[in-house]
Image (cartoon, coloured by chain):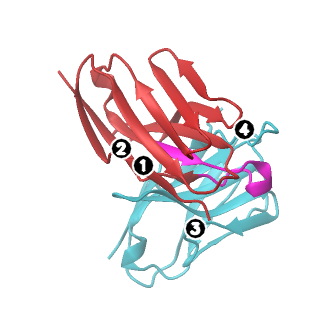
Amino acid sequence: GENVEQHPSTLSVQEGDSAVIKCTYSDSASNYFPWYKQELGKRPQLIIDIRSNVGEKKDQRIAVTLNKTAKHFSLHITETQPEDSAVYFCAASKGPTGGGNKLTFGTGTQLKVEL
Amino acid sequence: NAGVTQTPKFQVLKTGQSMTLQCAQDMNHEYMSWYRQDPGMGLRLIHYSVGAGITDQGEVPNGYNVSRSTTEDFPLRLLSAAPSQTSVYFCASSYSNGYGANVLTFGAGSRLTVL
């Protein structure tokens, strides 16, 4: 089955700096790659996603890039703020033919934005 | 519109006891799933359903049963609780937009402790 590796497991940045979290996946048939943010004690929530026919997607301070050849994708957060502090999960899936909601998640990155 | 509702929020069981975690969604989503979250291991899929009457196993199904008699409900049953099942459980629902978009809406989570 699919295997998603995520690095780093913890990341500490100064407010205003950029943060990058990287994930690799094993199944070349995967075609959908979402990122979820989980604040302490809360449920995970989708922050951005990308499909395999797109190389990059941006939403304000957040961007995701995808390299299908290398089978890796990354989350970029610019101008980090204290409210960005959370655990971030990447995930991958193969779409409807692979099970509509069968997401495989990475192990998470604890991001801490220091003042 | 309540989204995804999970009950109970907290539960303590003794080894060997059985219980059911309830999950209901009011968004008419076709897909529902159960994940468990353990420190350093991300979110792992237990069971999922692509529609009423259809269920399938995820990554870690042993010790758990599910059924999907209606679109709205997807209960998770622990048959004989073990300490290894101590975890936070998340139910999620999602829909497919035809390109494998698996935008998950998570419930608030259920923290289970097995003594």
Relative to the observer, which residue lies in front, B76 or A63?
A63
Three-letter residue code for mark 4? Met
Residue under pointer 1:
A6
Q: Subunit of mark 2?
A: A
* Labels 1, 3: front one: 1
Do we see residue B72 in this rendering?
no
Quadrant (top left, top right, bottom left, bottom right) of the N terminus of chain A: bottom right
Q: Which residues are magenta?
A: A89-103
| Amino acid type at image mark 1 | Gln
Q: Nearer the viewer, residue A32 or A37?
A: A32
Is A102 magenta? The answer is yes
For the residues labelled 2 and 1, say whether their Cβ atoms are less than 8 Å apart. Answer: yes
Question: Crowdedness of circle 4 by 10 Å Cα count: few (<14), some, many (20+)?
Answer: some
Q: Are marks 3 and 2 on the same chain?
A: no
Identify the residue shown where x is 57% and y is 47%. A71
Query: In the drawing, does residue B61 fall left or right of residue A15?
Result: right
Which residue matches tag 4? Answer: B27
Q: Give the Cα distance between marks 3 and 4.
A: 26 Å
